[in-house]
Amino acid sequence: MPYSTFETEHRVRPDDIDMFQHVHNSKYFDYVLAARYEQMETCYGMAMEKFMERGFGWVVRTAHVEYKRALTMGDYFLVKTGIESINDKGCRVAFTITNKATKKVSCDGYFDYVMIDMASGRGVKVPDDVIEHYGI
């Protein structure tokens, strides 16, 4: 089943830069997580806070990133994300980060998420209504 993808624009900030004068590799994770947080509310209509109200959270089980081209100070970039698969065990979110000016891919990859019970910290079954809601 094909799922929707969404795009969020960000800009490289001075505190994202490492000693080699490009974005530190760990910041790309932050970019994807920030985009997903925003997209959960604005694109899916179910913000992270709604999950928390139900006692649920999402945690990253696997993160895979392929770095292709560095972003540098002041670059504007687009973070495109979309659910690749979702089931009662969790979901895989694929992403691509593209330099807005050059239109070249900076990196791409995926995150595997598991839903947890916030009180116990243990994995739980993803409710059917969540699977249906995010299947847009």
Image (cartoon, rainbow, N blue to C red):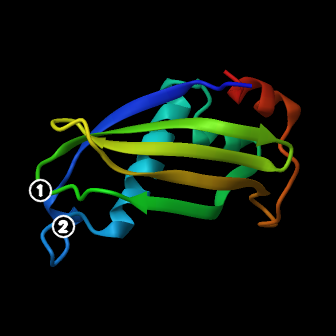
Mark 1 surroundings within 10 Å by alpha-carbon count, few (fewer than 14), some (14 through 19), many (20 or more): some
The answer to the question of whether label 2 and label 1 lie on touching residues, with beta carbons closer than 8 A, is yes
Nearest the eye: 119 or 86: 86
Where is 84 relative to 28, above or below? Answer: above
SS for dot 1: loop
| Mark closest to the chain's N terminus, 2 or 1 | 2
**Image check: 131 left or right of 10?**
right
Which amino acid lies under the numbered mark 1 shown in the image of this protein?
A: Met
Quadrant in which the C terminus appears: top right
The residue under label 2 is 17
* Quarter location, residue 48: top right
Name the quadrant of the N terminus: top right
Q: Which residue is rendered at x = 77% and y = 66% of the image?
A: 121
User: Which secondary structure, mark 2?
Assistant: loop
Which residue is the extreme one toward the bottom?
19
**For the point 88% across and 48% down, which residue is it?**
125
Q: Which mark is residue 73?
A: 1
User: Residue 76's quadrant in the figure?
Assistant: top left
Position of residue 127 measured from the top left corner of the image (x, y, whole percent):
85, 38
Q: Amino acid at mark 2?
A: Ile
Q: Position of residue 91 (x, y in %)?
A: 72, 46
- The Cα atoms of the two marked residues, 2 and 1, are separated by 7 Å
Q: Residue furthest top?
A: 136
Residue at 59% from the left image edge and 54% from the top image edge: 111
**Direction from residue 26 to residue 4 in the image, left or right:** right
